[in-house]
Image (spheres, rainbow, N blue to C red):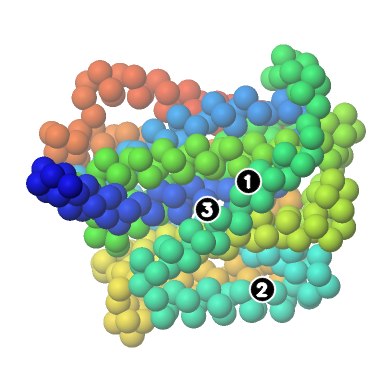
Amino acid sequence: MSGADMSLQPSTLRRLRHLLAALGPGLVVMLADTETGSVIAAAQSGAHWGYRMLPLLFVLIPFLYLAQELTIRLALGTGLSYGELVRRRWGRRAELASAAVLLLSCLGALATQLAGLAGIGQLFGIPAWQTITLLCSLVLIMVCTGSYRSVERIAICLGVFELAFLAEAWLAHPNLSQMAAQLSSLPLDNHDFLLLAAANIGTCVMPWTLSYQQSAMLDKGLTLDDLKPARMDTLLGAVLCQIITAGILIAAAAAFGDGAGGQSLDSIPDIAGGFTRLLGPTGGRLLFALALGGGALVAAIVVCLTSAWTLGELAGRRDSLEKHPLDAPWFYGGFAAMLAGAGALVASGVNLVKLSIVTSVANALLLPVMLAGLYWLSCRELPAPLAPSRRYRMALAPLLLLLAGFSLYAGIVGSLG
């Protein structure tokens, strides 16, 4: 080996280590994005409308990336979380209002995850309260005894199980000719279709995913040197998230008659029933449980961390997973309170599918406010090297406006229908 090769090798290894060290927040938040609510929205879309919602899922990829990329700029450019930036720019009242909306979104999302996990337990004859108690205890112990990096690694390992949805889509053998016919006929004037469209948007770009990534990058200690790998991390996650969601829709469309029957899925066992018809009672149930459970657990971790960071900021503290529970009572107390509150809501017997759809539509209705805040902060708070150029702002504004506008339109019209 020549001297030049020997000198290049350590540099290449350093760049690779730097890249791997920076990866994580974007991938985790995108794996959390493919959570119980997303599974329900995609499965309902496939059962009711066949493959007609597929174009929307893929069109959302650039919107998802562009929105999350703004959180990367703000985290690395200001060193502050979304809530801290809101307080600095608009004052304490605006921070309180923003936090209240975010925490309500987190509570609904977490209840959806726990209800989904309880539904998985019911598939195997385990009472819901036992499943919820066990999982909440394990998640709390994991967070209280770990660090951000260890929690991130566990979340990624859990999220890998979501790839089982792609296997299910492949094994479903979708009817390609029927798929092509349905994609050329989109019922954009149908209220039910618009409601599910709003739910799919609401489970793609969500307030808590935007807030989480910004805070997670700060907790992990990333700097401006990590800008490129952070963007790569987020882009990879956005593509993977929507491909997995599309796999869920395709499998559901094939399982429930390609949308011809307009079937209603009122529980996790109902949704799982379609997958068992495709893959058999044992294999289908197990594969579905692994895929849904992986995404739900990642989302539960992300939602709880988002809530804990938010509550800590309201108390004027920048808490972290690196701190001992006794040194960060607001952080760990908020984490535990969110788990307990969501667990109690699920134990009350709330309908999972209805809760999920309502939460998703609420996210779609709240999304314009969050996107407007991110856009404004990125234009006003970032230093020159990271601030969006005038050309980029002019291109980004109509895209975000389109996403926010359709989100509002679909959510309102669909709800009225």
Q: Is residue 415 visible?
A: no
Find the distance from the CA under tag 2 to the CA under tag 1.
20 Å
Place of residue 43 in the rendered image (x, y in percent of width and height, measured from the top left): 73, 42
Q: Residue at x 56, y 78 (%)?
A: 138
Check disc 1 and report the residue beneath it: 38
Quadrant into which the C terminus falls: top right
Q: Along the polypeptide, which appears first: circle 2 or circle 1?
A: 1
Q: Give the CA distance from mark 3 to mark 2.
A: 18 Å
Dot 2 falls on a residue whose secondary structure is helix
Q: Amino acid at mark 1?
A: Ser
Q: Which mark is residue 32?
A: 3
Task: Indicate which disc, 3 or 2, sits on the residue closer to the N terminus.
Answer: 3
Q: Quadrant of residue 227?
A: top left
Question: Is 191 displayed left or right of 83 in the figure?
Answer: right
Looking at the rendering, which quadrant does residue 379 occupy?
A: top left
Instruction: Say whether residue 353 is left or right of residue 359.
Output: right
State if disc 1 and disc 3 touch (CB < 8 Å): no
Image: 195 above or below 113: above
**Which residue is rendered at x = 53% and y = 73% of the image?**
139
Q: Residues within 10 Å of mark 1 (few under 14, many from 20)?
A: many
Towards the viewer: 21 or 300? 21
Residue at image position (42%, 79%) is 144
Task: In the rendered structure, find residue 132 and report the number of the disc placed on it.
Answer: 2
The residue tagged with tag 1: helix, strand or loop? helix
Nearer the observer, 276 or 41: 276
